[in-house]
Image: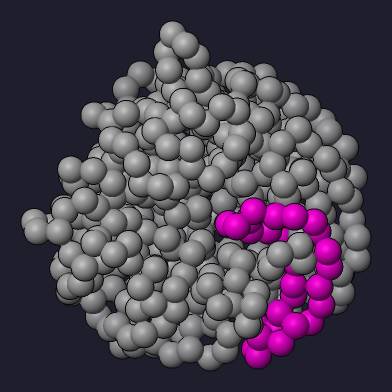
Amino acid sequence: MRRVLTVLSALLIVVATMGAGWPTGHGDNLRSGNATSASAFKKFTAGFSRGLDGSVYGSPILTAHSVVVATENNTVYALDPTTGAVRWSRHLRSPISDTSVLACSGNISPTGITGTPVFDPVTGRVFVVTITYSASLGVVHELWGLDADSGVVELSKRVEVPGTDPKAEQQRAALAVDRGNVYIAFGGLAGDCGNYKGAVLAIKANGAAGGRAYVVPTPREGAIWAAGGPVVAPNGNLFVAVGNGESQTSYDYSDSVTEINPSMSRVDFFAPSSWANDNANDLDLGSMTPAYTSIGYILQAGKSGNGYTARSGHLGGIGGQTYSAPLCRAFGVSAVTGATVYMPCTNGVTRVQVQSNGRFTTLWTASGIPGSPIVGPGAVYSLSGTKLYALSGGTGAVLGSIDVGSTTRFATPMLVGKKIYVGTTSGIVAANVA
């Protein structure tokens, strides 16, 4: 009976946290970026600014009590959501400052925790992945589970992609937790060098032995690197965008939207009929997290400028999209409300409406504001340069802006209550929206 009550309590915490909080990248496992319970936008005013010990590449998240953010110095911080006061911090490993030990130097230096953390209310842990180097072990990726209230380390485990070279792998995508698994996606470094392959690992959140991996069956490359991380559907299956692979002759399941079950087996995929040319010219779908709509379609774009819809449950294989048309080059993660998708297009956030037959239409583009958007009552929020913008969901017009300092390319805000939080190259900034 006690075990039943414990499980029920944990499930109630899950429901409460997922409904009103922001426990994972882009708010929920569908990566919707939709903060329905936040305050309606009125105007921006300054909140707090907290300097940390390194750049923040991942998004802030919210546990039951604290804002959690991780730095490229391999440090995790828990902050008071109102004041930004540090409740605890945990420095886990030294980052890699001499990037010559990597297969190629990449574009992050020093490099430590890059992917967005995730909070698991069942175990009460915050999970992050670090990268470090030692002369005896070489480059090492590790999964850490920290007690969300104290920062005490409760789990640490080496996590590497089977059959690859750790010094060529990068963990950039947001982590996910679902049904007792921590999901970790891997890709390569900027430069696409060395023996890497895209992969998703499933590790038990409670620390139990075992673990499974889906490794893209390509000779090389096929990164799963889009910053939004795996999309976890209601049935527990994962949808990931896979980047260009090495093959240009036999199809290697790269340049795709791939569906994976919790056992880490591929169950479905969609790839453009142009996959070979995409692979040859770096025009793949891997740069944007799949946009999972409420009407059964996934909207996907990438580096080529074309957009595709594929039906969840029957993605269609090679050339099997429901609809395709020129759309935009997209990097990052979209915000999704029902069948409306606000896309991170390189020319500016773009509102796209997906119709019941799978066709889509573009309604507006906020020129020059390309950051991965989120949406709340009364506004769509996106970053450009040193500014955070509030946009009209109906027209894309700028409703307000505020300076937040220098941010990284794939930075995306977190919106909870009356505050919006942004990781920066020097720490974290919060602004009031109401």
Residue 60 on the magenta segment:
no
- Tell me residue 78's x, y (percent): 75, 35
- Tell me residue 185's x, y (percent): 40, 43
Above or below, 231 against 207 in this view is below
Above or below, 307 against 356 in this view is above
Residue 409 on the magenta segment:
yes
Above or below, 25 against 373 in this view is above
* Position of residue 264 in the picture relative to residue 11 (left or right): left
Q: Quadrant of residue 400?
A: bottom right
Q: Quadrant of residue 203?
A: top left
Q: Residue at horizontal 43%, vertical 90%?
A: 361
Kindly give the residue lying farthest to the left in the view shown.
250
Front one among 34 and 368: 368
Q: Is residue 295 something that shows in the picture? A: no
Q: Quadrant of residue 162?
A: top left
Q: Residue at horizontal 74%, vertical 75%?
A: 390
Front one among 261 and 111: 111
